[in-house]
Amino acid sequence: MGQNPENAELPQLVDSHCHLDLDLFDGDREDVIARAVTAGVRALVNPGIDLAHSRSAIALARRVPGVFAAVGIHPTSSGEFAQADIDSLRTLASEQGVVAIGEIGLDYYWKDVPPARQQAAFEAQLALAAELGLPVIIHSRDANDAVAATLRAWVAGTHFRTSALARRPYAGVLHAYSGDAALAEEAYGWGFVLGLGGPVTFRNAHALQALVPVLRLDRLMLETDAPYLTPHPHRGKRNEPAYVALVCGALGQLYALPEAEVVAATTAVAATFYALQAADLQLGQPDSEKRRARDTVHESTSRNAAPIAA
Ligand SMILES: [Zn+2]
């Protein structure tokens, strides 16, 4: 879709949220990455769900160009949360390839972890994100009111307002957005963006599909949440990053815009959100020459070092 002769046929998609480190992908991870490249995915972000998976996300990011990691403890994994975990996350966040804190939040659908414990883990990780100047990836399931109250208080607090995070273009993303137009408006005011994935393709998702055209395209990131939330027509099977193209296609229809415009807008948001450079968008080229080129570009101010979005 771009004019670049090297990839004239390929869109420049970013899967802003997927869990490629999970063992469901152990048998064919390289094939999954290759299919993502073929579908035009140029970068993907793999959030952690606990400390072990934050480490495996970092390992994947180190091994595969175009893969980036977030570190965090998911609310459904926060049953044993202790303050010492924050020290572990702080150390992990300093690793190369870590671009966010996540995924964190509240989940009142699964009843395994009491809300008070989820809340403690959520607030401690929000504080860490502000301290480190890293944006947050928010999970909210059957908990939008409590998540909104927590984020509202967080962004109004002195710790956040005086932090490096408050000076970044975006502070966080409400991933797998399930709120209404009013919450979206409030979230934009916090410096947040929204993430949309497979559910926009579901045949019975009438309320979400009616909401989409009201949501700001310039505050939107595409995601798969693979292996979960598989888009139509693959529902019931394992999700994978290549299917972010299906999400993009559905959004093009809902916004009544050419897909290329959805690609351009959402990739610009994702690149700005995660502070990705043009040279970061080269998924699945684990060739050492390219890896070295990328590291060199990072260290210099030479060509391609400019952010791809202002
Ligand atoms: Zn997720």
Image: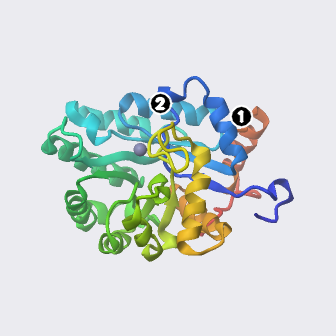
Q: Residue at x 51, y 52 (%)?
A: 223
Where residue 94 sits: x, y (%)? 46, 40
Q: Residue at x 32, y 38 (%)?
A: 73
The kind of residue tagged 1 is: Pro
Q: Residues within 10 Å of mark 1 (few under 14, many from 20)?
A: some
Judged by depth in the image, the label closer to the viewer, 2 or 1, is 2
Quadrant of the image occupied by residue 49: top left
* Quadrant of the drawing holding the C terminus: bottom right
The kind of residue tagged 2 is: Leu
Q: Quadrant of ligand 1?
A: top left
**Front-most of residues 189 and 143:** 143
Where residue 209 sits: x, y (%)? 44, 67
Q: Which residue is mark 1?
A: 286
The tag on residue 131 is: none
Where residue 225 sits: x, y (%)? 46, 46
Residue 164 in view (yes/no)? no
Instruction: Say what secondary structure mark 2 lies in.
Output: loop
Relative to 30, 76 lies left or right? left
Q: Residues within 10 Å of mark 2 (few under 14, many from 20)?
A: some
**Front-most of residues 121 and 228:** 228
Q: Which residue is mark 2?
A: 22
Give the mark, 2 or 1, whose residue is nearer the N terminus.
2
**Front-most of residues 96 and 9:** 9
Describe the colour scheme in one phrase. Answer: rainbow
Quick one: which residue is furthest to the front in this view?
A: 203
* Mark 2 → mark 1, Cα distance in angstroms: 20 Å
